[in-house]
């Protein structure tokens, strides 16, 4: 796609003709005619829309000023709006941004020009040609037309229309000159492939030493020109800096020297070559100290991604390892490009960030630069997009997936020998603490211990010593390095007795070994003895560690990791934790998985085989079966082709054989047609199971030749999750259209790297995104009716309901406690709240419950259960704000003699702050149960046990925490009434998650559109009911989108006069929800808010990869990109949890620790639990 400055040329031409030529008016009529054919592609079409938007935004639009019309075309023309349709710039911009959709189809430019002549340049369409007003047609095309263009173009020019022709992609220069008014032809080559990565700070560090030579330096200069030309350069977008080095570094320009791409390109064309010796270390240090600084234009403190590209040839005369490590520690992602003679000594690996496959490019010679330019562009773009929109989300997914790992004993065995620098030892401690934070730590849950070793091992703390994350992190923090030799074998033998001392039956035992060098004793036998004891070993090697030795320790390459420096440990944490958590996360998984693989002629046979190998990995990891995981396979080229349906093969052997037999088609790439074809394969007639989670994995190596957005949306609308894997020349924007969001997109440079994706994708499949999260802190008592009317089979159904709730909770003395009372005529306490601290114990106790003979005295049982929440029975004091929940399960009305006591019993529970939920079956009285629970939302009812369906979901709240929370919501016309209502529902759900009071959480709301409007001050309503009622009454503004103006307006709402409590040390949070790009700048207003101590969360809906969200939030971890408003509910809990767990409060006043508790159960959660006809729990 063409860079923005080319379009500024067009604008200049338009203005020149309108104001300087011999016309009577100083304005013009301008019609844009945009190619919307398959040649253009939907992703490039979106970019063109944005650039037209930029041009129009600079024009003075009005009925007596500039008039603008818009048409698009493929086989025929389509009117978007005529010259007299809109009278204001705001209306024109809103139409361009929100109402223009891609057509697809063949390219017939001649027909479109004729259409333009007949429809737009007429007085009734708003043309002022008869008044002498200049008439312009701006035609944007992507390829040679399939029909004749000369006649229609000539007629248009003869009537006085100036035709400006802009060619992109495969446009034909000769045809363009036929159409255009000379010399108004602009053809852009290369393409702005980084349009989706629009915010970053990138510095190039280029070796100009004598080893490079003038010819190679010229090749590097050409390479830089092409890379920069592909970037979206601008002061608020991508900034670029350049340093050349040899004997010493030489700063050419900083990140804030140039604001315009043309200035950078002009500078690069004149770049001189000097020669000299190679001092790479000093040059890298110079980057960190002088270039990646705020003074030199770095926006690191605004959350902007920092990247360095080092291009070098030849061995450095100084040390570069430590400077490179410091640069990476500084938060800079480092890429290294060099020739083979340098990479053979692994110099590039030691410079670049981890993993090398994504950050290192090896060349035979610099002549190859022209061939791999696309690869570097893709790597840079991928890094920028990934760090903002993917990494934070996958980190959240990882932590949520590890909730299922309820029990484990994990020891770290860390090398403390003298070869490790103090900073490196600190990196090890950071790595351990980040891993610890991922798990549910408790005395009966996941436990951690640490042993440090050098010549001899020493226990830093035992696995049973600390039972909370905070205690463990403090214990790790104070560990001091020992120094000495490296006897890894002796340390491994030492671990055997430590694990034996703390062994728990059926609890996984894991050992994570970190070492930086070769052991001075043998490791193989010691490691094997540990594995024979059932201990799983992960071996992490750093710098000089020996890979063979690491494999001997781990026993398999799958659990062996190697990094070039200790700062990279944090980057492999994700892989290790994922591997640890996968067995539990994937246990009992049911899924339908279809792979749709590109079989076009651009894929080499060897690469097609690698795709098949990747599919085999998915099969190997799956538990295949009709009631487990089903796998189907389709391939596509110009036409799609079925290989086998989901229910065709029920075992791995048959699947592997069928995959091996797949043969490549080798024609075009019609991905959209293939998606349409794939949709029906998830339906029941073709083996699909719509009641289980369904996944489509698309693998492609290039850009589709047809439309993918619509067929992909159709699949996702069926509840099917799509993962899009792009290799080589695949288009990221198109992959996002397929998957629906960036976090479901995976990109690799080559097919060899597919093997690295299998674990990542499968872990996500095992952890489907869910608006529901398991209970973390609550006292829950089951009150179960077990009188003579209950059969054993029915009572087992009740037990399964209880077990489902337990499974969805984090059990522990500091988390969720369970108790159980069975009642008939009299209630009986079977186990109290503090009886069990492990989930397995609670499940066993539930299994041992038995019905009791007698009548149904529910009121008596309610009074009995209420007392069981007291501290004498294990309940927790009310000062801890622990939620108390009573779950009543019954299939009978209470006995007549007990019925009069129900109102008093229900009232007493409410007064005691106990939340009651009732599950009624068969003959249970709905009236009675409604009276008991007080709210219909807390009543679940089924006519029989066969129909019983129950979902439990819990909303989160910060118990004793104070917070000021303001919502800034987009009320512009691009938000439909339904979506605006969804926003209001989202806000109300968030409100329900807090205790709203003057001394707890206060909530404010501002709506913005063209202008912002106050809806609720922070101190205006001090109850959740009042806040929600006011939210319900908000009326949408329905004008344009000025988010920057809204951000400036909201700042005063945090002040004391409007209820803000920042001066009292109260947490300040702002949640911005927007449905599109702002018509004004957001940067300065957002920075001012953050500088004032306000934590800003930015939620973007229907605007994939909007870096404007990053500029608002200033931190990628607080950016949420959602496909549509319907999925807002999936992030309710995440937003609330983030607000509760914010660490960096305003410095004034006394800080409080956040405490997460769960407030109520509601019927919202998937998966939910169903008692089926076979009386079994079924996961839907």
Image (spheres, rainbow, N blue to C red):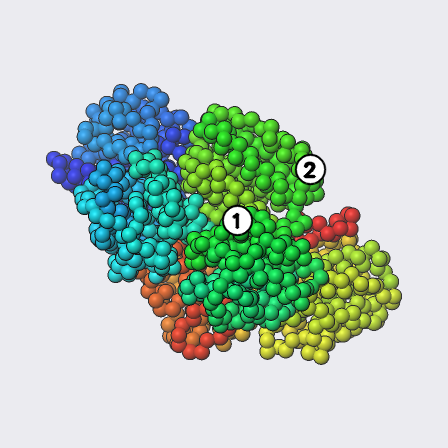
Please tell me whether residue 701 is drawn above or below residue 814 in the rendered image. above
- Crowding near the residue tagged with mark 1, few <14, some 14–19, many ≥20 C-alpha atoms within 10 Å: few
Which of 268 and 1016 lies nearest the eye of the viewer? 268
Could you tell whether 183 is left or right of 811 in the image?
left
- Is residue 818 among what the camera can see? yes
Label 2: state its secondary structure: loop
Could you tell whether 148 is left or right of 1128 in the image?
left
Mark 2 and mark 1 residues within 8 Å of each other at the beta carbon: no
Which of 1114 and 544 lies nearest the eye of the viewer? 544
Q: Which mark is residue 548?
A: 1
What is the distance, in whole Å, between disc 2 and disc 1 at their CAs?
A: 35 Å
- Is residue 380 among what the camera can see? no
Quadrant, the N terminus? top left
At 69% across and 77% down in the image, what residue appears? 870
Q: Quadrant of residue 539?
A: bottom right
Residue 777: x and y in percent read 61, 68
Residue 744: x and y in percent read 50, 46
Q: Which residue is mark 2?
A: 651
At 49% across and 55% down in the image, what residue appears? 518
Residue 671: x and y in percent read 49, 32
Q: Quadrant of residue 826?
A: bottom right
- Crowding near the residue tagged with mark 2, few <14, some 14–19, many ≥20 C-alpha atoms within 10 Å: some
At 19% across and 28% down in the image, what residue appears? 182
Which of 1054 and 116 lies nearest the eye of the viewer? 1054
Identify the residue at the far front of this view: 521
Which of 480 and 585 lies nearest the eye of the viewer? 480
Foreground mark, 2 or 1, reads 1
Q: Earlier in the sequence, mark 2 or mark 1?
A: 1
Label 1: state its secondary structure: helix
Residue 1054: x and y in percent read 39, 70
């Amino acid at each position: 796609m063409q860079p923005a400055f080319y379009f500024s040329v067009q604008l200049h031409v338009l203005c020149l003709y309108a104001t300087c030529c011999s016309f009577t008016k100083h304005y013009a009529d301008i019609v844009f005619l945009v190619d919307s054919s398959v040649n253009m592609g939907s992703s490039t079409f979106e970019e063109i829309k944005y650039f037209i938007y930029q041009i129009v935004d600079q024009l003075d639009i009005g009925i007596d000023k500039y008039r603008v019309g818009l048409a698009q075309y493929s086989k025929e023309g389509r009117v978007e709006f005529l010259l007299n349709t809109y009278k204001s710039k705001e209306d024109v911009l809103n139409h361009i941004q929100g109402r223009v959709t891609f057509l697809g189809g063949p390219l017939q430019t001649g027909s479109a020009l004729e259409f333009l002549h007949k429809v737009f340049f007429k007085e009734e369409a708003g043309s002022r040609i008869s008044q002498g007003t200049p008439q312009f047609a701006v035609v944007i095309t992507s390829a040679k037309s399939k029909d004749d263009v000369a006649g229609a173009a000539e007629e248009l020019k003869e009537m006085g229309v100036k035709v400006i022709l802009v060619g992109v992609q495969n446009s034909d220069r000769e045809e363009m000159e036929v159409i255009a008014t000379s010399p108004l032809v602009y053809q852009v080559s290369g393409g702005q492939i980084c349009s989706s990565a629009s915010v970053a700070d990138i510095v190039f560090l280029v070796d100009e030493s004598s080893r490079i030579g003038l010819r190679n330096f010229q090749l590097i200069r050409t390479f830089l020109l092409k890379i920069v030309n592909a970037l979206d350069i601008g002061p608020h977008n991508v900034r670029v800096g350049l340093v050349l080095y040899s004997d010493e570094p030489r700063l050419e320009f900083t990140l804030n020297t140039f604001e315009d791409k043309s200035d950078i390109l002009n500078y690069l064309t004149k770049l001189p070559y000097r020669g000299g010796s190679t001092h790479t270390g000093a040059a890298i240090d110079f980057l960190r100290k002088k270039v990646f600084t705020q003074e030199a234009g770095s926006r690191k403190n605004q959350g902007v991604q920092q990247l360095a590209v080092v291009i070098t040839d030849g061995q450095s005369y100084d040390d570069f390892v430590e400077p490179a490590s410091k640069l990476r520690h500084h938060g800079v992602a480092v890429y290294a490009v060099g020739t083979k003679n340098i990479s053979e000594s692994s110099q590039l690996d030691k410079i670049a960030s981890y993993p090398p496959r994504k950050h290192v490019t090896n060349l035979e010679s610099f002549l190859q630069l022209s061939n791999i330019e696309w690869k570097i562009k893709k790597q840079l773009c991928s890094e920028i997009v990934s760090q903002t929109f993917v990494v934070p989300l996958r980190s959240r997914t990882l932590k949520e997936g590890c909730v299922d790992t309820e029990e484990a004993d994990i020891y770290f065995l860390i090398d403390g020998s003298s070869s490790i620098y103090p900073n490196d030892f600190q990196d090890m401690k950071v790595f351990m603490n980040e891993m610890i934070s991922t798990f549910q730590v408790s005395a009966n849950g996941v436990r951690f211990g640490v042993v440090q070793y050098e010549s001899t091992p020493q226990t830093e703390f035992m696995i049973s010593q600390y039972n909370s994350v905070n205690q463990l992190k403090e214990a790790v923090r104070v560990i001091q390095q020992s120094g000495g030799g490296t006897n890894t074998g002796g340390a491994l033998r030492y671990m055997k007795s430590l694990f034996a001392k703390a062994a728990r039956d059926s609890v996984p035992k894991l050992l994570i070994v970190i070492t930086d060098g070769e052991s001075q004793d043998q490791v193989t036998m010691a490691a094997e003895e540990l594995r024979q004891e059932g201990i799983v070993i992960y071996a992490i090697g750093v710098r000089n560690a020996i890979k063979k030795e690491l494999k001997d320790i781990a026993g398999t390459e799958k659990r062996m990791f190697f990094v070039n420096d200790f700062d990279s440990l944090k980057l492999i944490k994700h892989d290790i934790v994922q591997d640890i958590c996968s067995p539990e996360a994937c246990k009992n998984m049911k899924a339908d998985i279809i792979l749709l693989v590109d079989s076009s002629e651009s894929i080499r046979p060897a690469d097609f085989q690698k795709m098949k190998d990747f599919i085999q990995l998915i099969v190997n990891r799956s538990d295949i079966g009709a009631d487990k995981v089903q796998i189907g396979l389709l391939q596509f080229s110009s036409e799609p082709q079925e290989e086998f349906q989901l229910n065709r093969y029920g075992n791995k052997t048959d699947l592997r054989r069928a995959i091996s037999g797949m043969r490549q088609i080798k024609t075009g790439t019609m991905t959209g047609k293939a998606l349409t074809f794939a949709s029906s394969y998830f339906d029941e007639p073709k083996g699909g199971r719509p009641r289980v989670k369904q996944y489509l994995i698309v693998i492609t190596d290039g850009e589709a030749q047809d439309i993918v957005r619509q067929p992909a949306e159709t699949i996702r609308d069926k509840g099917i999750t799509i993962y899009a894997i792009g290799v080589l020349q695949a288009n990221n924007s198109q992959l996002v259209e397929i998957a629906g969001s960036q976090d479901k997109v995976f990109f690799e440079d080559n097919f060899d790297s597919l093997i690295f994706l299998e674990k990542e994708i499968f872990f996500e499949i095992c952890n489907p995104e869910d608006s529901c999260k398991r209970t973390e802190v609550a006292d829950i008592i089951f009150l179960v009716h077990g009188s003579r009317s209950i059969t054993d089979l029915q009572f087992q159904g009740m037990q399964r309901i209880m077990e489902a709730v337990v499974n969805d909770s984090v059990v522990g003395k500091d988390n969720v406690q369970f108790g159980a009372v069975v009642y008939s005529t009299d209630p009986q306490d079977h186990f109290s709240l503090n009886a069990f601290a492990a989930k397995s114990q609670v499940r066993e106790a539930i299994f041992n419950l038995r019905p009791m003979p007698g009548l149904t005295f529910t009121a008596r049982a309610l009074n009995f259960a209420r007392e069981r929440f007291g501290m004498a029975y294990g309940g927790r004091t009310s000062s801890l704000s622990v939620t108390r929940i009573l779950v009543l399960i019954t299939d009978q009305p209470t006995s007549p003699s007990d019925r009069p006591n129900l109102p008093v019993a229900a009232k007493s529970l409410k007064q005691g702050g106990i939340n009651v939920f009732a599950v009624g079956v068969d003959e249970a009285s709905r009236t009675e149960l409604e009276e008991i629970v007080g709210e219909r939302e807390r009543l679940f009812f089924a006519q029989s046990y066969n129909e019983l369906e129950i979902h439990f979901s819990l909303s989160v709240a910060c118990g004793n925490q104070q917070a000021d929370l303001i919502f800034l919501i987009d009320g512009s016309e691009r938000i439909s009434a339904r979506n605006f209502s969804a926003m209001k529902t989202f806000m109300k759900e968030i409100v329900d998650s807090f205790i709203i009071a003057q001394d707890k959480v206060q909530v404010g709301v501002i709506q913005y559109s063209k202008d912002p409007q106050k809806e609720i001050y922070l101190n205006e309503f001090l109850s959740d009911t009042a806040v929600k009622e006011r939210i319900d009454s908000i009326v949408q503004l329905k004008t344009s989108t000025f988010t920057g103006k809204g951000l400036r307006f909201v700042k005063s709402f945090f002040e004391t006069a409007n209820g803000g409590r920042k001066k009292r040390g109260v947490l300040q949070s702002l949640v911005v929800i927007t449905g599109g790009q702002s018509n004004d700048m957001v940067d300065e207003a957002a920075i001012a808010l953050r500088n004032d101590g306000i934590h800003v969360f930015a939620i973007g809906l229907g605007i994939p990869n909007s870096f404007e969200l990053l500029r608002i939030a200033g931190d990628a971890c607080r950016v949420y990109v959602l496909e549509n408003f319907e999925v807002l509910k999936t992030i309710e809990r995440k937003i609330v949890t983030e607000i509760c767990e914010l660490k960096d409060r305003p410095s004034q006043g006394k800080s409080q620790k956040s405490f997460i508790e769960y407030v109520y159960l509601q019927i919202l959660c998937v998966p939910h639990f169903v008692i089926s006809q076979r009386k079994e729990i079924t996961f839907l």
